[in-house]
Image (cartoon, helix red, strand yellow):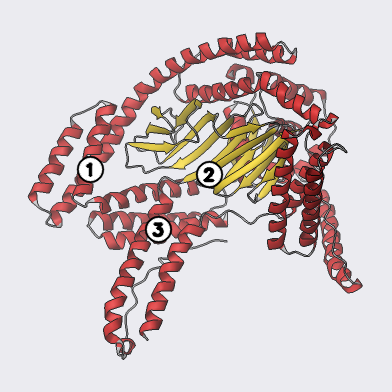
Amino acid sequence: MNPQIVPIHRKESFREDGMLFVRTEGILDTMVNAPLVIAGLIVVALTMPLQTSFSSTRMLDLTLYSDGSAHISAQLDVDPLDPDFEVDLFGTSIDNFVVVGENGFLLSSEIIDDKAMIDTFGSSSITINYDSHDLISKEGRVWTFSLDSPSDYSLLMPKNSIIVGMDALPSSMDLVNDQTKLDLSPGLTEINYIFSATPPTTTPPTTTPPTNDVSTYALIGAPIIAAVTGAIIMIKRKQTKSSPILQTEDIPETKTILNDTEKIFNLRPEMREDDKEIIKFISANGGEALESDLRKKFLQPRTTMWRAVKRLERQGVIEISKKDLQNLVKLKQDLEEEE
Amino acid sequence: MKTIVTFGLFVLVASMALGGMTSNVSAAEDPAIFLKIAKRAQDQIKNQISDDSSDKIKTLFEDGTQQVKLLENSLGSDDISSAKEHFLSAMKIFKEISRHLTTSDGSSNVAAQAESRTAHDSVRNPSNDLQRLQSYVDNLKTIAKKHNALIDFSQIDTLFDDARQQIKDHQFGDALDTIHEIKQIITDINQELREKASKQESQRAKEYAQKYLEQLDRLIENAKKQGISDEIIEKLESARENLSSTDDPRQIIEEIKKIILLKNQFDLTEHDELESRILQVEKTLYKLSKIDGVNLDTISEARDMLQSIKDNLNNGEFETANELLRDLAKQLAEIKNSL
């Protein structure tokens, strides 16, 4: 899609016959009521862009720990003309609070109860990270997470936790390092969970298909067969084109590559397991890969992969450059010097 | 006719208001995850129920199992709304069972004991504290790099390694001592970093004040053009003088807050709101121009439009500037969505 910039509001010239519109029996009533409604329309129209422009949460990620604490990471849009900004925190028991402006500079802040006053000095977006001890409660073996979120958010459940109750409908669910990750909508959510000795499995749900007649099966089966055949043809074609990803996957792993990744993992012991997989792939791909290829390989949405790449960049493991207007992710050679 | 006009306008107002509200609603849910979560909860509860469990628990479990079956059937027949209902009902029942199991004696089977032990251990085990601190220190490292602060993190990195090893060896007491040591070092690092950051903050505050002064000049100029009383203009000019004479970040915030009060008092905020939104749109445009696959002609057209908005604002044409700005924001959102 390639949308063009075209002003939506254009002044229409009214034709003479347009006046016929007001020559009605109820002209008096119309003239009394219409201005009121129009005024309402204008008020709504003026306030609408402001509602969405300022002080809105752009990204909100929560990580729950098994000791009942939670890490909150949020990115907020703020008014660049305001010198400071007040943020509502999730709780009053706050630790490790740190806030940076859009350029990554540390911003001064003061926490009073469940609010933080941040000196933004013209930043239009801020990133906040902190730990809260007020979002999770425990009754017997049942832990309860509750949050009234102002925006969509992601929630990473603790390791080995099993959800046994929830009053909200998640929009998606993933497994990240054996931890369940949910995407949830704004509003009040309560999730109850207990800890299990075994981690959650990745087995997809087995939905029992409803009893259908032969024609229904044929109707469903035909497109599937067509899709599978198409996919096989596509794969075959791709193989003949010898794409760099497939090529590198076929190349036997050399000891050097293995050593390189091991060295990286030793130097960055805190690295997440899914990030390690990305590093292994880049390493096996000759030390560099396009971000779009990483997305394809790991079947991740653009934002998730972008976050992972930025995380690795912050850890000093990779560097990002541009190649044919695309992000090229390269393993850094001088990793030891970076630390 | 009056009814039609009123109804039409009402629909417009309602659609604009609701449009603003629904724009933040999350993406479509994947209904398959409901079954995944519900089945996992069902299996977990099943493991906890023994022959000794009360009849109430057993009946509740049957109800829950029935809801899971209905959920499965609903999914099979693509009845998403009833699938949601059955999911929420099932999870509500499983939560109730978990609470009952927590309080009743019937939960003392092996699986429950194992879970209890896992949760109990995780509370004593300080690995969560360590994880949170590691995440905090990672943030501090990134900020230190951004501020070009030569802070030595080697000692704290070693302590993190020590603590990890101690946890691995189940020497939790020693690990807690190491964590205590880490916290002390973090306090020092934090102090050092905030001192460095405050110097740069002072510079940013000055730059911000300078931008604000320029914006204030434009406001005063427009106020004069619009024939606003001399008294108000004098007050604005005096506030401008006070702001320009200070370099202290806290003082800058105070002075700007006084100016904002003044603007609110004399209803001069329209200009400010437009300026803020222009700044935000400008930043969005800049970010979009850096994304792969964006049509550069489109970006160029958007830039021209932004310039035209600025010209309108400088000429006191708030209405036109507002309309164009809203159009541009919509166009940018479309570009963003198309990527």
The kind of residue on which mark 3 rests is Met
> Observer-nearest residue: A326 or B199?
B199
Query: Residue at the spot x=64%, y=26% of the render?
Result: A67
The kind of residue on which mark 2 rests is Asp
Answer with the quarter of the image where residue A46 lies: bottom left
- Number of other residues with Cα within 10 Å of mark 2, as a class: few under 14, some 14 to 19, many 20 or more: few
Asked whether, in this view, residue A210 is left or right of residue B196, the answer is right
Q: Nearer the viewer, mark 3 or mark 2?
A: 2
Residue sitting farthest toward the front? B55
Closer to the N terminus: mark 3 or mark 2?
3
Helix, strand or loop at disc 2?
A: strand
Query: Residue at the spot x=70%, y=44% of the render?
Result: B96
Which numbered marker is on residue B282? none
**Mark 3 — on which chain does it sit?**
A
The kind of residue on which mark 1 rests is Leu
Reading the image, the residue beneath label 3 is A48
In percent of width and height, residue B5 lies at: 38, 80
- Residues indicated by labels 3 and 1 sit on the same polypeptide chain: no
Which numbered marker is on residue B261? 1
Which numbered marker is on residue A148? 2
